[in-house]
Image (cartoon, grey):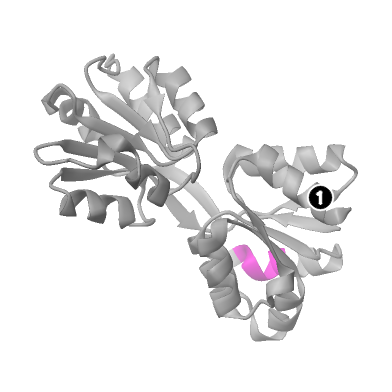
């Protein structure tokens, strides 16, 4: 097994190092870089306007990092009278460490569907919800919260910037390196990889296994053209779970 990791930033490199420790060859070739989001400057005033008991959701560790850095620069601390949420246990633990507040998360399904099943999400009339996220992503949480009576504010904490001019070179290196498995952690990464891979490289792409996070992205991969037996599904997005799934698949 030779693995291409497309997860951006330091977490992608961390997964490569974990794979190397298991004697699995891996390359880190993200399709995006991350930049500070355009709405970060509004965070301090937005937080100060929330009512006691309102909700703050962090969708990812990247959103947490950019939000926390902005708040720290302005001397703003996370309010104790708000309720904080995340989509999974590891992101929640990270958010709790950074915010110094308790963070709730779904136990059985670490995704938007799981969040929507939490008891706190059932009656939202009059609640303000702030969602710390990227410039794009799933809209399910926001849409369902609005249907349940909440007032939702998405905050772009970071932006994904496509490294499109280097994709052909990245694919060429991956092929020469004998890559046969690609780690894909978002639907956007999957779509970008398929849409921007040159026609002469498409057959190689669909011969590779794809290790994806969750059944939703697995379904997308099948729709794009991967055979089901070439789709490896990790139920969680953290690096340790991805590592375990890849190592087990190798065996």
Q: Could you say whether the residue bearing mark 1 is in a helix, strand or loop?
A: helix
Quick check: 13 above or below 214? above
Q: Nearer the viewer, residue 177 or 62?
A: 62
Quick check: 118 above or below 104? below
The answer to which quarter of the image holds residue 224 is bottom right
Position of residue 169 measured from the top left corner of the image (x, y, whole percent): 70, 67
In the picture, measured across the screen, residue 163 lies left or right of residue 22, that is: left
Position of residue 139 measured from the top left corner of the image (x, y, whole percent): 31, 57
Residue at the bottom extreme, as displayed: 199
Q: Quadrant of the N terminus?
A: bottom right
In the picture, measured across the screen, residue 151 lies left or right of residue 8, that is: left
Residue at the left extreme, as displayed: 126
The answer to which quarter of the image holds residue 144 is bottom left
Q: Which residue is painted at 81% across and 65% down in the image?
A: 180
Position of residue 110 measured from the top left corner of the image (x, y, whole percent): 49, 44
Q: Which residue is painted at 11% across and 27% down in the image?
A: 49
* Residue range corresponding to the magenta coloring: 166-171
In this rendering, does residue 207 appear at all?
Answer: yes
Q: Is residue 121 magenta?
A: no
Quick check: 161 above or below 168? above
Q: Nearer the viewer, residue 171 or 81?
A: 81
Q: Which residue is painted at 21% across and 17% down in the image?
A: 81
In this rendering, does residue 157 appear at all?
Answer: no
Position of residue 75 measured from the top left corner of the image (x, y, whole percent): 28, 14
The answer to which quarter of the image holds residue 156 is top left
Instruction: Identify the main secondary structure in magenta.
Output: helix
Residue ID for mark 1: 248
Q: Nearer the viewer, residue 154 or 213?
A: 213
Q: Which residue is painted at 11% across and 41% down in the image?
A: 125
Number of numbered discs visible in the structure rendering:
1
Structural crowding at the residue carrying mark 1, measured as other residues with C-alpha within 10 Å and reported as few (<14), some (14–19) or many (≥20)? few
């Amino acid at each position: 097994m030779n693995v291409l990791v497309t997860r951006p930033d330091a977490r992608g490199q961390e997964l490569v190092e974990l794979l190397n420790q298991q004697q699995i060859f891996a390359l880190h070739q993200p399709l995006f870089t991350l930049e500070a989001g355009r709405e970060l400057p509004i965070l301090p005033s937005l937080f100060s306007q929330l009512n006691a008991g309102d909700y703050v959701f962090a969708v990812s560790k990247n959103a947490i990092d950019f939000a926390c850095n902005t708040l720290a620069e302005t001397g703003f601390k996370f309010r104790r009278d708000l309720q904080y949420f995340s989509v999974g246990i590891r992101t929640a633990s990270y958010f709790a460490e950074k915010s110094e507040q308790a963070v709730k998360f779904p136990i059985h399904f670490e995704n938007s569907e799981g969040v929507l099943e939490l008891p706190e999400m059932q009656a939202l009339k009059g609640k303000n919800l702030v969602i710390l996220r990227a410039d794009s992503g799933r809209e399910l949480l926001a849409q369902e919260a609005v249907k349940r009576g909440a007032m939702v504010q998405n905050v772009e904490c970071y932006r994904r910037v496509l490294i499109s001019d280097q994709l052909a070179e990245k694919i060429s290196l991956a092929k020469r390196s004998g890559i046969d498995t690609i780690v894909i952690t978002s639907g956007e990464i999957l779509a970008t990889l398929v849409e921007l891979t040159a026609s002469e490289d498409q057959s190689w792409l669909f011969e590779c296994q794809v290790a994806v996070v969750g059944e939703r992205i697995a379904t997308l991969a099948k729709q794009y053209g991967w055979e089901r037996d070439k789709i490896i599904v990790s139920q969680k997005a953290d690096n340790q779970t991805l590592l375990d799934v890849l190592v087990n698949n190798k065996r």
